[in-house]
Image: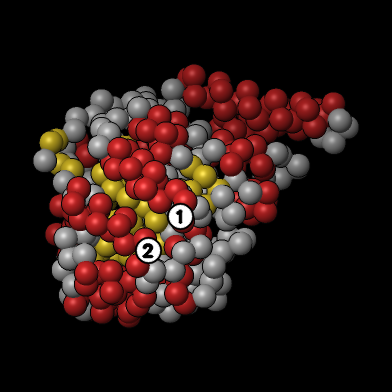
Amino acid sequence: MVARHDHRRNTRDPLDITRFLESIVAVFLRRSRAGRTPLVLISVLGLFALASLDTGCGAPPRGVDWNGKRLPVIDLHLHPGDWDHVPEDTRKFLASRFPFPLGLDAEAAAKGSLEPENVLLEIDDAGIWGAGLFAIYAPRTVGIASNELVAEALTVAPERFFGLASLRVDRWSTDRDAELAQLESTLSRPGFVGIKLAHAHQHFRMDDAAYYPIYEISARMGKPLYLHTGTSPFPGTSQDAPYTDPTYLEPAIQQFSGAKFILGHLGYDFKEQRNVGLETCIRLAKAYPNVFLEPSALGSAGSDPTGANLKEAMRRMREEGVVDRIIYGSDGPQSPGFVKGYLDRTVAAMQEAGYTEQEATDVLAGNFSRVFGVAIPAEAAE
């Protein structure tokens, strides 16, 4: 296990402010020339943007407050992306999460949110030290964020970003060997610590043994698997049980005991906003030492408006004694402030469920460190 060292950066230096204001004013100038935005609003919005920014001398303190002590945080689940490889329907869905007033270009904002520099700003603003960046090959649903794109993103913060590689499965009958070789090659590159799969988005069954060679690579190379479980709000997703119900992963979990399976979203039903797969995920974690749990996205304001589902999930996992299997993730960046907001909601849910300081430390960073073999430096919490 090799410790990574971090050199602190200011998240809101004058250059950041200048660029932010330039982007705001440029958008509204275009709207003004088109006769859609009065020029006076440009000045008002510029002043508002400047006033809303943190212009202090340093970044927010690293870590999250837990009864007066700062705990380190690693967010397993963040997405860089390539807007040009996102399907049109999904672009509209993502842009809809940017409810800016007065005709601001929401699609441009959504596109910018996928840049690794923006991901770094989001985790800095949340006090988060490290982040997992996911590759994905799902051209018919969420799009493509290639392994090369993630490799390039890792260079933005090599001490703090960790890559999870993926592969195409939609041409498996002809390209299987090439895709598996490419996956192995990527996992051998610096900074890549695991594998990302999303059966529902990639349209292959969880129990299809034709894809088991992926799990063999995971076990042999010691690279944990992150798997989307549960339904999905994205257009074109395969929503039937064999693609979403973690029960269908059990044969693979049994067969590949040397692979670590991280069940993302706890089998949450994002269509009906219910903890449909929670008890199944807990059962699998109790039955198999190679199963881990990740409660991302299910507790967001959009997917869990009252916060009750996230609170139930965090409470039930503690009641059933599987805190040592929980790895924190948000599924950001999504929209401005989402990463910090999700962390705050998760911490509040843990506090309400009676988590101890050590249990919270394990969930927020310790279990990630243990599962992925990443040491946490002292500066991860200040």
Q: Nearer the viewer, residue 303 or 230?
A: 230
Instruction: Please identify the quadrant where the C terminus is shown.
Output: top left
Q: Residue at x 16, y 68 (%)?
A: 289
Query: Is label 2 in a helix, a strand or a loop?
Result: helix
In this picture, residue 338 sits left or right of residue 271: left
- How far apart, in angstroms, are the residues tagged by discs 2 and 1? 9 Å
In which quadrant is the N terminus drawn? top left
Q: Position of residue 185 (x, y in %)?
A: 30, 38
**Farthest residue, direction right:** 35
Look at the numbered discs 2 and 1 and tell me whether their residues touch, using CB distance below 8 Å.
yes
Tag 1 secondary structure: helix
Report the label total: 2
Q: Amino acid at mark 1?
A: Trp
* Amino acid on which the number 2 mark rests in the picture: Ala
Find residue 224 and report its image quarter: bottom left
Residue with the mark numbered 2: 210
User: Which residue lies at the image location 37% right of the left edge and 52% below the top edge?
Assistant: 196
Q: Quadrant of residue 129?
A: top left
Residue 129 visible to the viewer: no
Question: Where residue 6 sits in the image (x, y, percent)?
Answer: 23, 29
For label 2, count other residues whose C-alpha is less than 10 Å away and answer few (under 14), some (14-19) or many (20+).
Answer: few
Q: Please, is residue 330 above or below residue 308 in the view? A: above
Q: Is residue 85 in view from this perspective?
A: yes
The residue sitting at 32% across, 38% down in the picture is 186
- For label 1, the residue is 172
Q: In this orientation, which residue lies closer to the viewer: 381 or 135? A: 135
Report the residue that reaches farthest toward the left.
Answer: 1
Relative to 320, 309 lies left or right: right
